[in-house]
Amino acid sequence: MHIIETEIQGAFIIEPQVFQDARGYFFESFSKRIFEEKVGKVHFVQDNESRSVYGVLRGLHYQRGEFAQAKLVRVVSGAVLDVAVDLRKGSPTFGRHVAVELSGENKRQFFVPRGFAHGFAVLSDEVLFQYKCDNYYAPGHEGGIRFDDPSLGIDWRIPEANRVLSEKDLKLGTLEEAYRF
């Protein structure tokens, strides 16, 4: 496994070593030992999966306070632009984001630590998206930032006319109004 540091401390891109031959391929998608050695201690308690179609934009979401979640995200099939925004008080990169293309082909994973808002845009016809969380979902403690907040400057790579968002995501506030971790 190759661990790549991003420009924002704590967020990592993980590239597995893929063994491929005429039969297909094999790779280790998670190793607690390697992860803790190179990224840090984590105890995942919940695995989630979603299926979405082209243009779907989910996010930017977070869980507040003691319900904050770190996530290890990956795409099984299709492709997304995955985005994490730093919401940590006092962080030199507060309000900045990391955007990573994840796909079934590149098999990359993205570790989003606690203290970040997270979202993704579907770049392929369809995507199967999986993620591990280190805390359980708590609906009363969710929050978010509007995907198109101009202070974030995120290029979602989806034309405006093709974006598909939930009513809930369209009502999210700005970075200025967001919870600080």
Image (cartoon, helix red, strand yellow):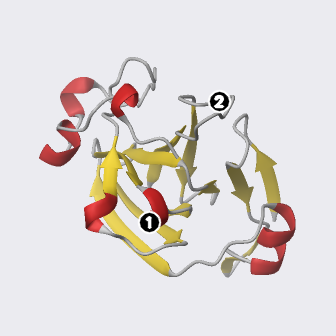
Compare residues 126 and 47 and report the one nearer the observer: 47
Q: Nearer the viewer, residue 154 or 51?
A: 154
The span from disc 1 to disc 2 (Cα, nearest Å) is 22 Å
| Residue 154, image quadrant | top left
Q: Residue 152: horizontal and vertical position, in percent?
A: 45, 24
| Quadrant placement of the N terminus | bottom right
> Do residues under tags 1 and 2 come within 8 Å of each other at their CB atoms?
no
* Residue 67 image position (x, y, % from top left): 44, 66
Image coordinates for residue 55, horizontal then vertical, percent: 28, 41
Rate crowding at label 1 as few (under 14), some (14 to 19) or many (20 or more) other CA atoms within 10 Å: some
Relative to 93, say whether 138 is above or below: below
Q: Quadrant of residue 51?
A: bottom left
10 Å crowding of disc 2: few (<14), some (14-19), many (20+): some
Residue displayed at 61% across by 55% down:
113
Relative to 129, is 9 above or below? Answer: above
Given the image, on which type of amino acid does mark 1 rest? Phe
Q: Of the residues shown, which amino acid type is indicated by label 2?
A: Thr
Left/right placement of residue 16 relative to residue 58 reads: right
Q: Is residue 56 visible?
A: yes
Q: Position of residue 84 (x, y in %)?
A: 52, 43
Q: Residue at x 40, y 29 (%)?
A: 175
Question: Which residue shows up at 32% across the image and 26% down it?
Answer: 148
Residue extending farthest to the left is 167
Which label belongs to residue 67?
Answer: 1
101 relative position to 32: left or right: left
Mark 2 element type: loop
Tell me the residue at 37%/17% (across/down): 150
Q: Which mark is residue 93?
A: 2
Q: Nearer the viewer, residue 178 or 6?
A: 178
74 vs 166: above or below: below
